[in-house]
Image (cartoon, helix red, strand yellow):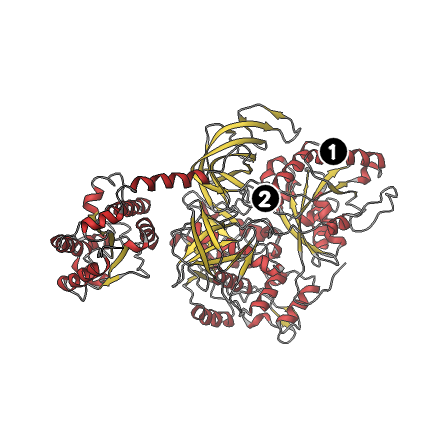
Amino acid sequence: MTPLDALESQSIYILREAHSRIDRLAMLWSLGKDSNVMVWLARKAFFGHVPFPVMHVDTEKKFPEMYDFRTRYAEEWNLKLTVRTCPPVEEMDPTLPPAARSAARKTAGLNGLIAEQQLTGVIAGIRRDEEGTRAKERVFSPRGEGNVWDFRNQPPEFWDQFRTDLPPGCHLRVHPLLHWSELDVWRYIKRENIPIVDLYYARDGKRYRSLGDKDITFPVDSNASTIDEIIAELETTDVAERSGRAMDHEAEDAFERLRVGGYM
Amino acid sequence: MATAYALAAPRNLLKIAIVGHVDHGKSTLVGRLLNDTDSLPAGKVDAVAEMCKRRGMPFEWAFVTDALRAERDQGITIDASHIRFSDAVRDYVLIDAPGHREFLKNMISGAAGCDAALVVIDADEGVREQSRRHGYLLHLLGVRQIAVAVTKMDTVDFDAARFGRIESDFRRLLEELGIELSAIVPVSGRDGDNIATRSAKTPWYHGPTVLEAAAAFEPMPEPVELPLRIPVQDVYKFDTRRIIAGRVESGRISVGDEIVFSPSNHVVKVKSLEGWNKESPIAFAEAGEPVGITLEDQVFVERGELISHVAQAPMETNVFRARLFWLGDAPLAAGKRYTLKLGAIEAVVDVEKVERVVDTADLVAANTDAVPRDAVADVILRSSSMLALDPATVNPRTGRFVLADGYDIVGGGLIDMDGYPDQRALITQRATNITSVENTVTDQMRMARNGHRGGVLWFTGLSGAGKSTLAVELERRLFQKGYQVYVLDGDNLRGGLNANLGFSPEDRAENIRRVGEVAALFARAGFVVLTAFISPYRTDRERARDAVGNDQFHEVYVSASLDVCEGRDPKGLYQRARTGEIPDFTGISAPYETPEACEVELNTGKLDVPESMEKLVAYVEKHFPYDGDS
C-alpha cells in the first residue's frame, strides 16, 4: 500500500463504521477541497453511492463559483442534498470579534439543522494539521447538551474502537479526514482526478488556499495555477493554510471559543 | 532542514508517540525539534514570543505545541496532539501523549497505533512511577520500538554519571517486559543539545541524537504474512450487488478463495472483489486494504462475523483469559457485566474471575478481587454468545478488544487462550447429533406420504396489499387439492409464541425471525407453509430464507402501490398513521424495502383475487411436486 492508499483505507473504515453505528447520520459539504475529497471517499466506501444526506450550511456569502459547483455536482454525484440558510449575524454572540461573530452564524445554522433533523451523527472534513484545537480532536467526537465540545474530558480512542453510543440529546462529530495533511489532500485530488472549485488556482498572482465566506476569506500570493504547482508550492511554503481566514487570528482564543460552541 | 522532494510522491509517514511524566519537558522537546527541523509555520515562534511577553513570562518552547488556552493556563498538556515534521528521508507525525495521571486515557489514545515511542525522563528526577507505568502500557499497546530522551541535562550540568544511572534503571525495566531499548539520549530543550544537532557539552556521549534515533525507527509492517482475517463491518445492498464490506486485518484474499464466516460457519466462495473508480477488476486484497466481497452463493451473514480461509480459521470460544488495562472510574470486579468490542463484534461479557492485579507504577502483582483505575490485571471473561478470535500472540489484530461500560470505553485487553479449548469442534459435533435424530423418518418418506414437497411461500407487501386474503384463499384451494398446507399470520403467532413481543423495531425483527424458524420446521415436516407478514426489511426476509433453505423458500411480493393500499385501508390503519396516532407505520413513517429477487410478484392493483389465485396455484403445482425419485 502507498501512503495515500493507507490514508484512504483508514477514512473508508471510519465512514463505514459511522454508517453502520449511527442511525441519523449526515455529511457536511462545504464545497471546499476537503469536503469534496470526503464525498469522494464516501463513494469509494459505499461503492458509488452516498447513503446518507449531504448538507450545506449556507451563509449565503459564498463565492458564486461555489454555488455553481454545488448545483452541478449535487446532481452529477447523485447526492441527497439539504441546504440550510444560517441565521443573521445580529443574533450571534456580540462579545465575539467581528469575523468570528460572522463565522458563528455557521455554528448556529448547523446546530439548528442538527436539532431539526434530530441528527445523532455529523461527518465533518476537519484535519489535525489545520489548526491547534483540531489537532486535539477524536475521530468520533461526542457533543453534549447544547452541542458543546468538552475537550478536557474526551473519551479514549484506540485500536479503531470508537465511542458510538451516546445519551439522548447528544450527537457525534465524525472526522474521516482527521489524519490527512493539506498536501495529502492535494495529492489525492490529483490521483483521483476529483473536481474542485477554480478559486484554488492562481489568477493574477493570487489564489485561495482555504475557502470560506467571501467577506472574511482572503487570497494568498501565489502563481500556482495547476494541481502540480499547488503541490510544489505547499512542499516549500511556511505560511499556514488558514492564514487567509480572518476569524482564526482576531484573538488568541477566538477559534477555540467557536469550536467549543459547536463550530467544525 | 527544509526539504524538497519528488513532486506528487508522498513519502512514508512514521508515527512516534512522545510520552512522559508531567513537567519532564515533553512539549519543550517537541517545540525545539520542530524549530530545529524548520517545521514551524512562519511567525509561529514570533507569536509565542509575543504572547509570553504579554504575559510577562520567559519564552517557552512548550507553548508552540500547547495550542489550547486552557493548557497554557495550567502548564500541562491535556490531549494527544499530532504534529508533523520531516527529515531528508521521510515524514514523521509526533503524537504528543500527555503524562499526567489524570490523562492516562489520552496517553493511550495517542500511543496506540504508533510505530514507535519516545519516552521523556527528567534528568533531575530520574525514572519514577509514571515512567514505569508508561513503559508497561506501551508494551501492552503493542509498541515495540522505544527510545528515551533524558531531558533538562542543563540542570544537572550534563553529568555523565547521573545519565548512566537513569539509563541502567530504565533498561532494566524494559528488559523485564521483553523490550530492547533502541536508544537513550541526553538532551536539553532550551539550547537544543542532542536534539537535531550533536552537543559539545556531552563529549562522553557517543549515541544518536533524538532526530537520528527517530530516523532509525522502522514503520510497523501490515501483517500480510499472517492467516486471513476480515471482520464483517457491514452488508450493503445499494444496487443489484450484495456486498460484504470490511477491512483486511491480516493476510490476503483473492477472487475464487473458499472462505468461512465464523461463528456461523458458512463456507462459500468469493465471486468478486468490488471497488469504485478502479481502472481494472480487483483480483486480491492484502492486510490494511478495505474490501467489498460478493459471494458465489447467498448466505445470511451479519456485522461481527470473522472471515478467514477454511484451513486457518480463528478459534471459537465464549470464555477467555485477558490481560487488560483498566481506565474506568469504578473498579472492575468479578460478577460485573460489560460490553466487549472485538473487531466488529459487540457482545455482553461477565467478569468471571480476577486472577491477579498488577500495579503499573511498581509492577508488583497483588491478589485482590477489584481492579482499580490505571491498573493492569489478568481476568477471565465469559460471553453469552460464541466469539471468533485469536490469541494476541498469534494475531495482534484479532486478539485485542476494548470493554465499554454504558456509553464509555473503560479498558482494553489482549486475549490469552492458554488452557481454553477451541469450541469450533464442539459446535460442529452438536449439529451432527441433531441431524442423526431426523434420519429415521426421512424427507423422502414424508414427501412420499404427502405426495408433494414441503416449503414456504413467503407473502410480503404493504398493509392492505392483500397478503392475508391471498394466503387464506390459497390455503383453501390447496387443501381441497389434498396438500398439507397451513397459514402462519399475526393472529396465530402473536397470540402465543410471540405474545411477549411488541412493535418496536427489535421486537418486529424478532417476530419475523421466529416466523421464519417456525415456517422452516413446518416445511421440514412436509407442509406447504403460507406466511402473511408485511416483513418490510430485506435483512429479515433473507434471514428467513436462510432458516428455511433457499430451494424451499419462495418469496411472493404482493406489490400494490401505497395509493391503492391506502385507498383500501380496511382497518383504518393508514388514517391513524397519517395523524401520527400509530408511529413507525410501514409506507408512511417507516420504510418498506422492495424485494430484489422475489420468485413471484402479484400486483393486486391490477389483478383480481381469482387471477392471482390462478397464478399462485400454477406456481405451487410447478414447484412443489413429488415425482417419486427426488
Total of numbered circles in the picture?
Answer: 2
Q: In the rendered view, would you say B320 is above or below B219?
A: above
Which residue: 23% across, 49% down? B581
**Which amino acid is tagged 2?**
Ser
Which residue: 74% across, 41% down? B181
Image quadrant assignment for residue A211: bottom right
Q: Residue furthest front?
A: B629
Disc sitting over residue B109 in the figure: 2
Which residue: 63% across, 62% down? A183
Image quadrant assignment for residue A249: bottom right
Q: Earlier in the sequence, mark 2 or mark 1?
A: 2
One can see residue A237 in this view: yes
Check disc 1: other Cα within 10 Å, few if <14, some if 14-19, many if 20+: some
Please, what secondary structure does the residue beneath circle 2 have? helix
Q: CA distance from mark 2 to mark 1?
A: 26 Å
Q: Is residue B353 left or right of residue B146?
A: left
Residue A100 in the image, given as x and y percentages of width and height = 55, 57
Residue B409 in the image, given as x and y percentages of width and height = 51, 40
- A110, A171: nearer the viewer: A171
**Which amino acid is tagged 1?**
Arg
The subunit carrying tag 1 is B
- B298, A258: nearer the viewer: B298
Q: Is residue B374 left or right of residue B340?
A: right
Residues at discs 2 and 1 both on one chain: yes
Mark 2 or 1, closer to the camera: 1
The residue beneath circle 1 is B172
Image quadrant assignment for residue B559: bottom left
Residue B231 in the image, given as x and y percentages of width and height = 49, 49
